[in-house]
Image (cartoon, rainbow, N blue to C red):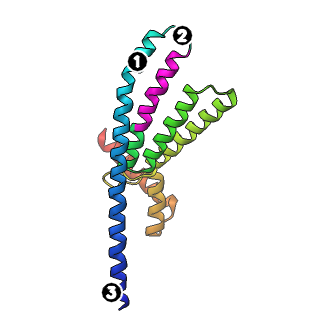
Amino acid sequence: MGRGRDTMWDKARRILYRGGEILELLMAAAVVAGILVAMITLVPELARYWEHRTIAGAFMEYLDAVFNVVIGIEFLKMLCKPSSANIIEVLIFLIARHMIVQTTTPLEDLLSVVSIGILFFFRRFMLMTKPDKDQHVPKLFGVIKASQSSGTTQAEHVDAEKNAEGSKGAGEK
């Protein structure tokens, strides 16, 4: 009886999960509609900017409208393919928009630049530690993984790796 209950709950979880995916797609469609409307409104914004191009701040208003569309597109990408890299990309655009379009103090600009730098660092670190398509692990993590799995010390593995590279380089000459 307990086994039947588990499968019933598993079925219910799968149905709820699928329902969540469908709702997520509906929200993505709503975001697409919003992006299309925002893109259409860029045309009058461009005309307004052209008329007032000599007035200070006119370009910033136009740039604000463009950034809204770009952030909407990035948000759509995040909804359709959620990943930490996409989330970080959206955050970078949001911070950049705030720093460029809004009137900010030097301290806020410094914090924005530091925040973007930290986000770039995290994005780079995530890509560096992620195995590539052939499941090759970056050297640093390969050394750690090999030493843990085979029982060899890191020094032995590094020496073996250097010897392999040395013989490969000698063969290429």
Marks 2 and 1, how far apart at CA: 14 Å
29 left or right of 59 in image: left
Q: Disc 3 designates what residue? A: 4
Q: Earlier in the sequence, mark 2 or mark 3?
A: 3
Dividing the picture into quadrants, the one containing residue 66 is top left
Magenta residue span: 57-72
Q: How crowded is mark 1: few (under 14 residues within 10 Å), some or many (20 or more)?
A: some
- Per the rendering, the mark at residue 55 is 2
Which residue corresponds to the image point at 32% horizontal and 57% vertical from the top-left?
Answer: 22
Q: Position of residue 109 (x, y in %)?
A: 63, 30
**Which dot, 3 or 1, sits closer to the camera?**
1
Q: Residues within 10 Å of mark 2 (few under 14, many from 20)?
A: few
Marks 3 and 1, how far apart at CA: 63 Å
Which three-letter amino acid code belongs to the residue tagged 3? Gly
Which three-letter amino acid code belongs to the residue tagged 1? Leu
Q: Disc 1 designates what residue? A: 46
Q: Is the magenta stretch mostly helix, strand or loop?
A: helix
Q: Position of residue 80 (x, y in %)?
A: 35, 48
Q: How crowded is mark 3: few (under 14 residues within 10 Å), some or many (20 or more)?
A: few
Extreme-bottom residue of the structure: 1
| Badge 3 element | helix
Asked if the magenta segment contains residue 65, the reply would be: yes
Q: Quadrant of the N terminus?
A: bottom left
Which residue corresponds to the image point at 46% horizontal and 59% vertical from the top-left?
Answer: 157
| Badge 2 element | loop
